[in-house]
Image (cartoon, coloured by chain):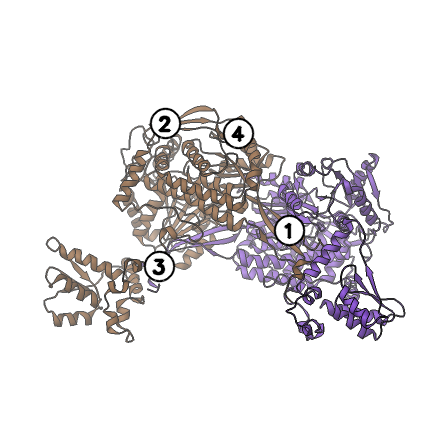
Chain colours: A brown, B purple
Amino acid sequence: MTDLCYMACVQRLLAARNRLFPQFATHNALTVASVIEDAGSVDGYEFQRLYGMGEALYEALGAELPEAVCRIYAPVGGHRDLLAYLVRRLLENGANSSFVSVAADPRVPIAEILRRPQTRIADAEDARNKKIPLPRDLYEPERQNSAGVEFGDRASLEALLAEVREHAASDVVAAPLLDGVALPGVERKITSPIDGSAVGTVYDGDDAIARSAVAAAAAGFPAWAATPVEERAALLDRAADRLEINRGRLLALLQSEAGKTLDDALAELREAVDYCRYYAAQACSTLTPQPMPGPTGESNVLRYRGRGVFAAISPWNFPLAIFLGQVTAALAAGNAVVAKPAEQTPLIAALAIALLHEAGVPKTALHLVPGDGAVGASLVAHPRIAGVVFTGSTEVGRAINRVLAAKDGPIVPLIAETGGINAMIVDATALPEQVSDDVVTSAFRSAGQRCSALRLLCLQDDVAQRMLDMVIGAARELTVGDPRQIATHVGPVIDAEAKAKLEDWIAANERAGRLRFRAEATPPEGGIYVTPAVIELDRALDLDREVFGPVLHVVRWRAGHLEALIDEIAANRAALTLGVHSRIDLTVERIAARLPHGNVYVNRNMIGAVVGTQPFGGTLLSGTGPKAGGPNYLRRFATEQVVTINTSAAGGNVGLLAQDE
Amino acid sequence: MTDLCYMACVQRLLAARNRLFPQFATHNALTVASVIEDAGSVDGYEFQRLYGMGEALYEALGAELPEAVCRIYAPVGGHRDLLAYLVRRLLENGANSSFVSVAADPRVPIAEILRRPQTRIADAEDARNKKIPLPRDLYEPERQNSAGVEFGDRASLEALLAEVREHAASDVVAAPLLDGVALPGVERKITSPIDGSAVGTVYDGDDAIARSAVAAAAAGFPAWAATPVEERAALLDRAADRLEINRGRLLALLQSEAGKTLDDALAELREAVDYCRYYAAQACSTLTPQPMPGPTGESNVLRYRGRGVFAAISPWNFPLAIFLGQVTAALAAGNAVVAKPAEQTPLIAALAIALLHEAGVPKTALHLVPGDGAVGASLVAHPRIAGVVFTGSTEVGRAINRVLAAKDGPIVPLIAETGGINAMIVDATALPEQVSDDVVTSAFRSAGQRCSALRLLCLQDDVAQRMLDMVIGAARELTVGDPRQIATHVGPVIDAEAKAKLEDWIAANERAGRLRFRAEATPPEGGIYVTPAVIELDRALDLDREVFGPVLHVVRWRAGHLEALIDEIAANRAALTLGVHSRIDLTVERIAARLPHGNVYVNRNMIGAVVGTQPFGGTLLSGTGPKAGGPNYLRRFATEQVVTINTSAAGGNVGLLAQDE
């Protein structure tokens, strides 16, 4: 396929010889011959070969067609620049299918070597390597992957943009929804962080509504708990489909209410869809009855049951994905749910709940109470709450835990995913271009408003200045502004309070002489924007809080002092995500083994955990576990019951009597 | 095999014809012929057949040997008495191997029917049905079962008794053990609840020692956490062997310190052994790295890590099994442990720790601090504690939870197994003999000092009086006294405080006219005994506390009011064990589905949960889960870490290049 694609490009390039001069660097004799044949001559282009390779090939060519030009090239530079190039070459030459490898193998007949790639592929059906699953099939047979959109394909992108524009609205409504009935509440206008324009209206719940919601959920629990797990799963699968069908409405609202760029909004929708299907599949595989081994004459089965009413308290930064992740997990395990979305993003939450109800999730099992922290507190304090799933700050998580512990009822689970002070450790073997790309993405994408976002970049000082220059150079190129513009990289922060906090932090560090970079931009008026900033600190310990926005902190560490750096990173006891850029496997393993961070990303960016691939969540101050989107999540939402039956009590052991002799 | 055993019995009976008159009830022609041949005549015994069956057989016999006697019998009685008998008959006749079934099958040749059982079995190797595993192999290939002792076999029992007597001691010592070093502490004598005799001396720890122990464990944690899981598991397997090798010492101490009968002590030792091997096996199967599916060019692996220092706080009622269950689970998952045994039973705990150290568990990973509740409180309050595993009262569990929540550090797991108000529901279809047997075992064995013990017997009133009479009749036959006597059923309660509480409760109920039975006994002087009692209450709701001793409460419920009874049982929110005696499957399932009790036992006693067969633990006020000895326990002791590696960062995707075309 590579050879065939190469030849397709060759034909295009040759056809453009009036405007450009193609240079074909190849050591493949068949390719050389094909180029000459397609070109019809040796004019208007040249061949190239790597110094020390392909000598015999081009010697033979020169003997036959002396007018053909072959340029000999040699890479020149430091090992730093050449290492990756040489590794790539080694891998290519080492591959079994490589021409260089095949040509040198006396067992391979010449005819086989010269076989045209198109004859090997035969037809379009065979064009794909079936061992590489299509993205859609990545998780089959367990479940279908969420649908992606190729932004590089103009038609797909335009279609998506049109769909989003079509659903732009300024009059979306959310209200407390108990048993499917909207209740009156305190009216509050929701405006867009993009430009302050109207998005819609929320009617907030209060303590009385929160208590009614718990009562309604408690009443709805037995029927939902008694619904077979396969049926619950089927409803969640249907919900996933409803989400995909309604992508225009959801993306439009994710943009207007939460200020998301299109790629962020789409990634979030996909995550929500994946949660539905993943928990549906997981419920069927992990919450179905498990027979236990034991003596004959007795049956022992471990069964899973919903706990009762779960309060799901979610954040504004993933107002659809985390919101629905919590809700669908609790539902999948057989719980009734009262969902309390973030104060800033009730509209998208209400739409999500409506789609779940549409899909058939009983209105008696799933209730919504928008409102502020006081509503969350009412839910948590209610004696009938059988569990709380929460994503938000470490402080609020701790407060919830205390309220739960203060009650005289059962000890109920709190599944909390809280803050992080996420570091990336870069050593001198890392590839600077890759580091710079991954740092900018990790720190500034989504305006840094991800739990997983990079906060603290730790550069080995031998390479620190050069890497920092590259990072700042790349950050300077970011477009800050209206996230609905496809060219925008960084949209608004969520609200004025967040902006004030971030600006105070940046200003304080600027006064202390630590600000190394601040991006400039002229974002829409009426919007709430914080431009990317880079702050240099003396040591890792100096960053003692989560700065939830597009602010990257940088420290330098000395070669040979990696352990000390690790100790400093460990000292703050936040342990959510961790990045490592190094080409030394031992260093990578040493760092991952020493630090208890829940998600470690090596030689890539450290955001965008995918459901079922990168189960997400940290330890210590960053969360309780188990990881969302992972194989151990659902069971925490369930209780276990072992039913032991004396099967021989009826008068005999049928199991024995039925055995063959 | 049944036929062969039958003939072996026939020979013994025939040989004793001078003393007894054998009667052989069989419809099997081969058996009849074999009896006559072995007897050499038809004198001094008779045959029997069931009315309506075997007519042709005995007609033929009468024709050939008129002097042979065949008595015809018919069961007479109510359906209540006959149902089980008839079911057994149906099962027998329905079995493929039954003579009745085979004889009626024209495809089976006569020679086959008349083949002697011994020729089918051929040799001793074939004598066992290999589809029925030996007890030892019940859990293979996962793990070896703990060794049992057949008490019915005099030689085995005598050997065991001798081994226990040999290890009787009165000078056992326990002390705080940090890094394997015994520290001085406050001296306290341990006396036996059996008769007040000396068992040994404990040196109790205090707050300072508890804090030092946590510090020592924190220092020992990294090395233990870094020990490969297979190696940790191997050490626990070795610990199981050490426990079995030392059964004499352990059983002697379980008897003298905790007042256990021999069967209880042996069952407890077996449980401890099973915990070691089960958690070892589980660690290898559930805590090893799990690859996650994902796109090519990236590796995603979910790994499990120890949390840090676990405090293990255990009760006196299973001073070896629960103590070691907690400790081995925490160790298996890679945690360092500070174990705080119950104040009443530090000596057996110290011996258990010594055996684990002997087996190779690092002394830096496992530390012991005997003492009272204040020592437990010191451990729980320590900022370095990464988790608490606790078995004890609901009140103490709640207090621990509050102390943990009050701290400013991470939210750490509390794995609590707490009290129960365990009910058994008996309907009119239950078999009275079975009910009475299971009730007496469930309520009075171990002097009722099991978390799982039956507290509240709920009898359908149609059969209540008869069943209650049978239960009381059986309870009257129990021997209360020195548990070292093999004839003893009920040993002492743990201490004077427990006795006083129980006697107060019984006396109050006696004054209220509710005492229906109190056993009489003359147990050893100086011992602490409470004889079995039966108290009748008006309704299930009246039992609002856990009465931890040999006191059975009984209520009656009216047919058609099962839901109301279930509601009353649910109302106290304790949900540990539940017994059901009924021959109606729908009733059983209805009860199990309605009540959230962790362990439901149907048509059998409700104590003695076996590791890996009946994972143990309740919900609501009875515990947090996950179940001890179950597949989900270990992961609660561990944290999750996902390591995501961009495997193509080095310059190419080897995975793709290496794929076959």
Q: Nearer the viewer, mark 2 or mark 4?
A: 2
Residue B154, how many percent across, how many down? 80, 65
Chain ID of residue with mark 4: A
> Given the image, on which type of amino acid does mark 3 rest?
Lys
Rate crowding at label 1 as few (under 14), some (14 to 19) or many (20 or more) other CA atoms within 10 Å.
Answer: many
Relative height, residue B606 to residue A113 (above, below): above
> Given the image, on which type of amino acid does mark 1 rest?
Ala
Rate crowding at label 3 as few (under 14), some (14 to 19) or many (20 or more) other CA atoms within 10 Å.
Answer: few
Residue A529, how many percent across, how many down? 33, 33
Answer yes or no: are tags 4 and 3 on the same subunit: yes
Relative height, residue B508 to residue A575 (above, below): above
Q: Nearer the viewer, mark 1 or mark 2?
A: 2
Reading the image, the residue beneath label 2 is A171
Reading the image, the residue beneath label 3 is A130
Mark pair 4, 3: CA separation:
52 Å
Which secondary structure, mark 3?
loop
Residue A13, how many percent across, how many down? 16, 56
> Given the image, on which type of amino acid does mark 2 rest?
Asp
Quadrant where the C terminus of chain B is found in the figure: bottom left
Mark pair 3, 2: CA separation:
48 Å
Q: Nearer the viewer, mark 4 or mark 1?
A: 4
In this view, the residue farthest toward the right is B18
Which secondary structure, mark 4?
helix
Reading the image, the residue beneath label 4 is A210
Q: Nearer the viewer, mark 3 or mark 2?
A: 3
Reading the image, the residue beneath label 1 is B339
